Amino acid sequence: MGFQGWNAFLARFDVWGTPLNPRSQPKHTHLDLMGTYYYLIRAIYKSVPNRDARHITKILMRKLSAAFTAENTTIHLDGLPSVEKADEHLRRYHIKANALVRASALVDHCEAAAVRGESLERASATALKLIGDCRSIPKPVGERILANLEKKGWKVCYCRGEADVCIAGQPDIEHCAVVSADSDLFLHSRVQELVRPNPDNKKQFLVYHKDDLLERMGLSESQLMVLAVVSRSDYTVNVRGYGLARNHKLLRTLSPLLPHSSRSISNRKQKSHWERVIEESESILDQYFEHVDADEDQFMNAINIFWYQQETLLPKRRAGFQRRSFNPDAWALEARLQNARDTVEVSRAEPELEASMASLTLGESSNQPRRFHRDKKQDGAPRRRREDLSRI
């Protein structure tokens, strides 16, 4: 999902990606499979894992080959959910459960309306959207897709935890490009280049560079890292009243070199670049807490993820609860809705069929006398009636 309101926030600073050139891929690329193609895979997946996985792989192969090369691309798949993202998984679970309840009520309404012969266009469209929101992609299906891609020559990675954390934690990630539709992957500390699907053109990808983002937003690397921590994302909730815009405005006034900072920055020349950036971020975060009613514990999950790429995996028992599938219920509702729509179509077609049959019967009876009682040939010569021919 990423940061709430991130795309609209970037539009304020005129931050637009450049189209990806599919013929040139000099950097190694790490691609988050579900983060990039989740909605496409969910739309294709129906109910038969093996068959659907093969079908999905064929479609993904065409899309991947059009933009990336197998030699320079590693495809990552999520593993177990993390403790840091547990609240977000629980929130998504409740969203699916509520969508299922609303979809079930709408399908009941559609079935009753179909019996009365009423229109189902608006209600069925809303029900189909809710049914789609209930559905999810089972983990075995994703694993089969990844195995099929590996057989086709693509490099793959079965991540232990979240794919975005695995990608951001790669040793050489600052020299690579990352591909995902999730905005939060771009705000990990060492990620420098993000490739995202173009929402206006599904066949195109857009490339974003962090240097360009920092320049347009007027932030330093350390200020952007603090913005990632204190803004609402899959890992944390922002301070009430402090969204992306207000946090951005406040952070632009904070500097890691202010003398009143509670953390001193020393031996800067002896530290690596990322150690200095994190130390500066800690200093700015201390100053941020002087302006808002919050403490560091509230944002510890986001700090571990975005600054250090560290996560704690949920036990499999709890992870299974988070990944519970509503697919069987959704498919049953979809079948009931289709039956209701068929009932309406049949009820509408019956009067038209009866009218057409009646007109056909009348047409045959009106044509019969002319067929057997023509008095003239086609050339105009007189001819006997058919009744007279029997006498000859």
Image: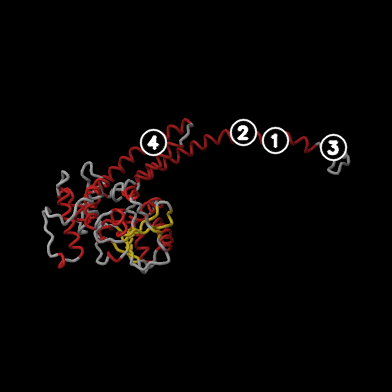
Q: Disc 2 on helix, strand or loop?
A: helix
Give the amino acid at mark 2: Ala
Give the amino acid at mark 1: Gly
Q: Which residue is mark 3?
A: 375
Marks 3, 4: nearer the viewer: 4
Q: Which residue is mark 2?
A: 355
- Residue 106 is tagged as 4
- Asked whether the beta carbons under mark 3 and mark 4 sit within 8 Å of each other, the answer is no
For the residue pair 246 and 141, the one nearer the viewer reads as 246
- Asked whether the beta carbons under mark 3 and mark 1 sit within 8 Å of each other, the answer is no
- Asked whether the beta carbons under mark 2 and mark 1 sit within 8 Å of each other, the answer is no
Distance between the alpha carbons at the discs numbered 4 and 2: 33 Å
Distance between the alpha carbons at the discs numbered 3 and 4: 66 Å
Of the image marks 3 and 4, the number of the one nearer the N terminus: 4
Q: Which residue is mark 1?
A: 363
Image coordinates of residue 325 in percent, x first then y, are 31, 48
Evaluate whether residue 318 shows in this view: no
Give the amino acid at mark 3: Asp
Crowding around mark 4 (Cα neighbors within 10 Å: few <14, some 14 to 19, many 20+) is: many
Marks 4, 1: nearer the viewer: 4
Give the amino acid at mark 4: Leu
Of the image marks 2 and 1, the number of the one nearer the N terminus: 2
**Where 270 falls versus 353 (above or below)?**
below
For the residue pair 166 and 127, the one nearer the viewer reads as 166
Q: Which image quadrant: the C terminus?
A: top right
Q: From the viewer's perspective, is 114 left or right of 315?
A: right
Of the image marks 4 and 2, the number of the one nearer the N terminus: 4
Q: Quadrant of residue 169?
A: bottom left
Q: Disc 4 on helix, strand or loop?
A: helix
- The structure residue drawn at horizontal position 44% and vertical position 36%, both measured from the top left corner, is 122
Crowding around mark 1 (Cα neighbors within 10 Å: few <14, some 14 to 19, many 20+) is: few
